[in-house]
């Protein structure tokens, strides 16, 4: 499809000159453009196809960027990016040096708040709305939240705050619930559309306020108020939002511009906190995504839109996520105490099969990481063995619970930390860069760093059989392809292993960087140790290697400050050893989005980078390098 109308839109101001009929044509072109674009770059698909009309309506009605739009999660903003001057850069989406798959303040003035973790939009929009009040500026703040983000407590904390005045001042803000879970949504039709427009208009307000004045101080006032609440509650599910101090409107069809635009125009003129409930369909307009929105939530790479996601020609390597999923089922079969917990990441964490086989022991708590951790703690108090499957980046959201509810009470909760280290196209917001540093400083906590798929299975088994909290970190994607043993075998607790004996330099590898470290060991004739544990650190092995080598090199796919390298230096200091240490890991900066292999190379964590760092640090000691065989 050609996109002649879309090609004329360089900014939302161009779009505001279009007629209502032209806006519908624009929606068709924009949806196709997003589909074609994602098919060439990969990225989130279903959620973006579902927000085309809503995006157009918002930029058409509100004076962006003067009025602030805050998109929750942010993986629904590709139409927003196309309409705000980034159409010609969509070919670089999620690639190194290209535009982000999420809103970023340094990318566009239309990206008013950087998002990628869920449920932050209402808090941010409230802050913006109150700042406008304090500065005497007439502007609107709009939070667009959905895709399960309303299940998080932070969203309701913000609404609870927004619904009450501060010094007699209420925020002029609009919260839009983008409800795309059709299985639980009420039917959308003419009656709902009529009620939404009626309740958002001036006539309804005037009639309601007039009635209040007439009935005020009479016995009928309370009866009328209750009747209004119950009448609205019978038709629309807005009672809870009204109780929080918001004027609830909806639900309305989020794909109907003739309904969206006049409703938003009415709400734009209202003062105080407003709440609009729109119903959209993930994958709307693309039949394959409509039929399976979960499968088409994101494309990992290129695909043919006419065919959809094709099966790979050759069987892909098993991923660490799949290793965890199989282990979870096997351990659950072996131990009835095991309970699996996920904060809304069933597919991402590899728990689909576990849910099918053990439905009574599977808990999806929604996007509620804090609750997930404390819920696991409660289960552990009663003798269960909870396994919390959570991305490393999302465990950050439950750090207080990790310390206060699990570690202080020394409860045997296992944390399976997927997406540890660099995650690639999702960038800094999703990188699991900090878990080694923030876990190893917590008393009672232990942390395992398996090097490959089989060791990951063994590490999970080891963690599960402890009687205290233990985390196992593993990266996104596949490992080196080692054979995975069927047995549920444990690792020796707190012990690393020597994988290669060399001389002068000892490389201590934590996690999957063991394999590039082995390559370097072969080239430099260095000793290579697979440390396996970031905590408890194998201090005996560290001391032995320090005494028998001239230098120690630590390698980890995590942040350097407070990381595994720091643990090694602390152990050497405690032992009174002064062996030089070169710590290699992620630099003290946020890692951009891009191909994971390229990012590791840029961080100096591929084999070539590790070798060059060693040679540079020990430049005065050329004897470190093994002579070539023909010399």
Image (cartoon, rainbow, N blue to C red):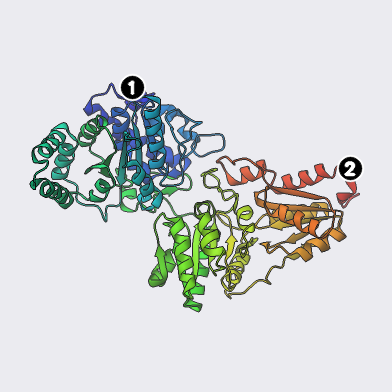
Q: Secondary structure at mark 1?
A: helix
Q: Position of residue 332 (x, y in %)?
A: 48, 74
For the residue pair 161 and 500, the one nearer the viewer reads as 161
Left or right of residue 594: residue 179: left
Left or right of residue 400: residue 549: right
Q: Position of residue 549 (x, y in %)?
A: 86, 57
Provide the residue designation for mark 2.
Answer: 620
Find the distance from the CA under tag 2 to the CA under tag 1: 63 Å
Any part of residue 527 in sight: no
Provide the residue designation for mark 1.
Answer: 14
Q: Residue at x 33, y 49 (%)?
A: 288
Asked if 124 appears above or below 321 in the picture, the reply is above
Give the quadrant of the N terminus: top left
For the residue pair 593 and 315, the one nearer the viewer reads as 593
Q: Position of residue 88 (x, y in %)?
A: 45, 28
Q: Residue at x 25, y 27 (%)?
A: 22
């Amino acid at each position: 499809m050609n996109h002649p109308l879309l090609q004329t839109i360089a900014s939302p101001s161009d779009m505001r000159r279009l007629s209502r009929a032209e806006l519908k044509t624009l929606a068709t072109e924009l949806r196709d453009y997003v589909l074609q674009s994602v098919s060439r770059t990969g990225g989130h698909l279903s959620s973006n196809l579902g927000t085309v009309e809503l995006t157009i309506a918002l930029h058409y009605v509100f004076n962006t960027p003067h009025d602030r739009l805050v998109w929750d999660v942010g993986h629904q903003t590709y139409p927003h990016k196309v309409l705000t001057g980034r159409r010609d850069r969509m070919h670089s989406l999620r690639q190194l040096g290209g535009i982000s798959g999420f809103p970023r303040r340094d990318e566009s003035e239309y990206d008013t708040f950087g998002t990628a973790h869920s449920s932050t939009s209402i808090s941010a929009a409230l802050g913006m709305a109150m700042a406008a009040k304090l500065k005497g500026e007439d502007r609107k703040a709009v939070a667009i939240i959905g895709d399960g983000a309303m299940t998080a407590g932070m969203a309701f904390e913000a609404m609870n705050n927004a619904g009450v005045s501060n010094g007699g001042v209420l925020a002029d803000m609009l919260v839009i619930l983008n409800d795309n879970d059709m299985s639980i949504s009420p039917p959308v039709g003419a009656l709902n559309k009529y009620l939404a427009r009626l309740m958002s208009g001036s006539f309804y307000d005037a009639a309601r306020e007039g009635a209040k004045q007439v009935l005020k101080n009479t016995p009928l006032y309370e009866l009328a108020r209750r009747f209004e609440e119950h009448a609205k509650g019978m038709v629309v599910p807005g009672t809870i939002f009204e109780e929080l101090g918001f004027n609830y409107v909806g639900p309305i069809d989020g794909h109907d511009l003739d309904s969206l635009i006049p409703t938003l125009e009415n709400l734009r003129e209202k003062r105080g906190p407003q709440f609009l409930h729109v119903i959209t369909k993930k994958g709307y307009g693309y039949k394959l995504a409509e039929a399976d929105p979960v499968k088409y939530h994101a494309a990992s790479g290129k695909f043919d839109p006419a065919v959809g996601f094709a099966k790979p020609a050759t069987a892909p390597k098993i991923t660490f996520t799949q290793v965890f999923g199989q282990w979870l089922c096997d351990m659950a079969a072996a131990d009835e105490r095991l309970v699996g917990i996920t904060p809304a990441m069933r597919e991402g964490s590899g728990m689909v099969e576990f849910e099918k086989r053990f439905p009574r022991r599977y808990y999806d708590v929604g996007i509620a990481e804090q609750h997930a951790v404390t819920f696991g703690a409660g289960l552990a108090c009663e003798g269960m063995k909870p396994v919390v499957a959570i991305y490393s980046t999302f465990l950050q959201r439950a750090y207080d619970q990790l310390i206060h509810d699990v570690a202080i009470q020394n409860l045997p909760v296992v944390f399976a930390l997927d997406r540890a280290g660099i995650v690639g196209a999702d960038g800094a917001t999703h990188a699991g860069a900090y878990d080694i540093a923030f876990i190893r400083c917590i008393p009672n906590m232990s942390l395992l760093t398996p090097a490959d798929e089989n060791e990951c299975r063994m590490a999970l088994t080891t963690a599960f059989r402890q009687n205290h909290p233990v985390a196992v970190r593993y990266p996104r994607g596949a490992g080196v392809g080692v054979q995975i043993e069927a047995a549920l075998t444990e690792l020796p607790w707190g012990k690393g292993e020597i994988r290669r004996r060399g001389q002068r330099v000892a490389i201590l590898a934590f996690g999957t960087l063991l394999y590039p470290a082995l390559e370097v060991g072969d080239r430099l004739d260095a000793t290579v140790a697979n440390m396996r544990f970031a905590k408890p650190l194998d201090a005996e092995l560290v001391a032995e290697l320090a005494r028998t080598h001239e230098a120690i090199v630590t390698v980890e796919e995590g942040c350097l400050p407070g990381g595994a390298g720091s643990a090694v230096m602390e152990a050497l200091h405690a032992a009174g050893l002064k062996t030089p240490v070169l710590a290699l890991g992620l630099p003290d900066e946020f890692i951009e989005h891009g191909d994971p292999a390229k990012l590791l190379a840029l961080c100096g964590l591929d084999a070539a980078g590790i070798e060059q760092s060693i040679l540079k640090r020990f430049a005065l000691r050329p004897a470190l390098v093994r002579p070539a065989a023909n010399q």
